[in-house]
Amino acid sequence: MIFAGIDAGSRAIKVQLIDENNRTLASGLGEQGVKQADLATQLLEQTSAKIGINRDDITKVVATGYGRDSLEFVDTAITEITCHARGVIHQISEAKTIIDIGGQDSKLIRLEGQGVVQDFVMNERCAAGTGNFLEVVARQLEMDILDLGKYAEKADKPAVISSMCVVFAETEILGLLTSGESRENIIAGVQASIATRIASMGGRQIADPVIFTGGVALIPGMTSVLENTIGHSVVVAKDPQFTGAKGAAIMASELN
């Protein structure tokens, strides 16, 4: 039997197919858009084709993420908090804290024994603590987002980014550039700003092991900045963008 998890995030759609033993068979990643259901259906079909099957060969499908309720073709929809927890625990059973930084929001999830969600905190929709913030600085500095880390490493004094909103932060970055601040210090300041917001979400209640998920976990340098800011070692989940989709697929395998 084959099961599917669809994570309809705010910026991207992720699909993962697994077998009855929770082994990953195929994964797919696509951009989010207005017609979320159509895009998710297309991505599911494309991902299925990778292993030579079609939609009818999939036993159950679970949707999660920002746009989960718009996918009427799935068997059920489950919150991203629950699915992220399940996806992480599948990899690292002893995980206690999940830091998930996506394109439009950030989440800190605390787990009890055996992956039960104790509680969680999410940032404000406009807060400058997400992947969108890194996209903004990469665009302003005319560089690839994956190159930000190597420049941040060369910073001698990270710039202070105080704005809580991405729009105002973008203006603040332009001001720093105009005043002659180095791009290395600006990038380091942006990374530090994101990490500081995560630390404030967690307060003193961050327990090890800490697992890092979401697209921002793929940005070089972010893990070390997080570690230095929260004072804990941070482990990047395998395929961090697909953690929610993996958890959704596992939960699909458990549906009656």
Image: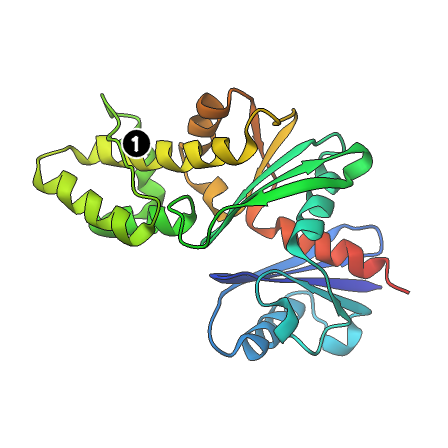
Can residue 67 be seen here? The reply is yes
**Front-lying residue, 147 or 125:** 125
**Front-lying residue, 218 or 109:** 109
Q: Mark 1 points at which residue?
A: 188
Can residue 45 be seen here? The reply is no
Residue 144 in picture, x, y percent from top left: 30, 48
Specify the quadrant that holds the C terminus.
Answer: bottom right
Callout 1: SS: helix
- Residue at left 54%, top 74%? 36
Q: What residue type is labelled 1?
A: Ala
- Residue at left 65%, top 26%? 209
Residue 217 in picture, x, y percent from top left: 49, 40
Query: Callout 1 environment at 10 Å: few (<14), some (14 to 19), or many (20+)?
Result: many
Using the image, determine if residue 115 lies above or below residue 12: above
- Residue at left 32%, top 37%? 190
- Residue at left 71%, top 34%? 92
**Is residue 243 found left or right of 93 in the rendered image?**
left
Residue 247 in picture, x, y percent from top left: 71, 52
